[in-house]
Image (cartoon, helix red, strand yellow):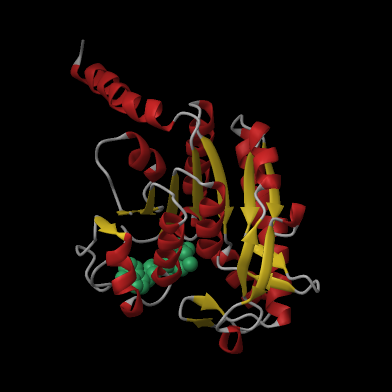
Amino acid sequence: MTEALETRVSTLLEALPYIREFHGRTVVIKYGGAAMREEFLREGFATDVVLLKYVGLNPVIVHGGGPDITSYMERLGMEVRFHEGVRVSDPATVEVAKMVLLGKVNADIVNRLNRHGQPAVGLSGEDGALFDIRPHERSAEVGFVGDIERVDVDVLNHIAEDYIPVVASAGADREGNSYNVNADTAAGKVASALGAYKAIFLTDVSGWLADPSEPDSRVSRATVDEVSAELPKVSGGMRPKLEACVEAIRGNVESAHIIDGSRPHSLLLELFTDAGIGTMVTG
Ligand code: ADP
Ligand code: MG
């Protein structure tokens, strides 16, 4: 065999124990940010997820729409503000966020998965009463941002039998008010409610950085207690991500991973090769 062929064969063999381990397991994937920004990354993400389904995993996608919501708000001349990594949401912001999330971002993900050969179904927290929302603890600062009180996984389990569920992170409370929900928070809750095997968060940095200004300071592994101890010091978009990892692990998810979605096929690299990338949080 030529060297190139041997490399290909060994890549497949390297994946085998992982494929065996993950068969039939649920993996919740938070999709957002960087991995959504470029066409080739959107296509790469879709092929990766479809491959997961073909090899017997049960992928569940939870997504935000960060960059798209921001760009539509700017086109409408609306002010965009964040407070500790959470979008400040007045009723007009929630209206736009919901339209963009469902009408554009969600529809695009569903369309791509369908095209690559695994049918997907898009839904938001309101469909099948998936999320029960209450106002965020910092609602005085952030407005109509919701916390998920309860996830009713029935609808997800039904869909996942035949389709890939694609969940947009928005929902309503019992009075019918709509809320923006941070997609990391939603993914953490969904993973723990489903009793997922893994929760994977795609982002735009290599992982959790001990020093955010130092790209080489990635924490490759941490326990949930170590993460909890450091949380008060973490700011920006990494905060809800680490909180979501803690939520997932406390909900009996085996491991939570924060990986760089701007790296093509980072999902496959993380799941099926020995070279763990990103940050892995365990119990
Ligand atoms: P996403 O779309 O992945 O949710 P966010 O911008 O919300 O993206 O979150 C990722 C961002 O969090 C990084 O780009 C970085 O600017 C910021 N951040 C803040 N603190 C840290 C940290 N300790 N490690 C890594 N990133 C951090
Ligand atoms: Mg974010």
Q: Quadrant of residue 146?
A: bottom right
At 59% across and 78% down in the image, what residue appears?
A: 136
Q: Report x, y in % for residue 124.
A: 69, 56
At 69% across and 46% down in the image, what residue appears?
A: 154
Number of numbered tags placed on the structure image? 0
The outermost residue toward the top is 1
For the C terminus, give its image quadrant: bottom left
Compared to 227, does 236 lie above or below? below
| Residue 186 or residue 151, whichever sits in front | 151
Compared to 273, does 17 lie above or below? above
Q: Quadrant of residue 224?
A: bottom left
Q: Report x, y in % for residue 86.
A: 52, 76
For the N terminus, give its image quadrant: top left
Left or right for 68, reference 174: left
Q: Quadrant of residue 269?
A: top left
| Residue 251 or residue 127, whichever sits in front | 251
Compared to 149, does 42 lie above or below? above
Left or right for 226, reference 148: left
Compared to 98, does 262 lie above or below? above
Q: Report x, y in % for residue 234.
A: 34, 75
The outermost residue toward the right is 175
Q: Report x, y in % for residue 111.
A: 66, 42
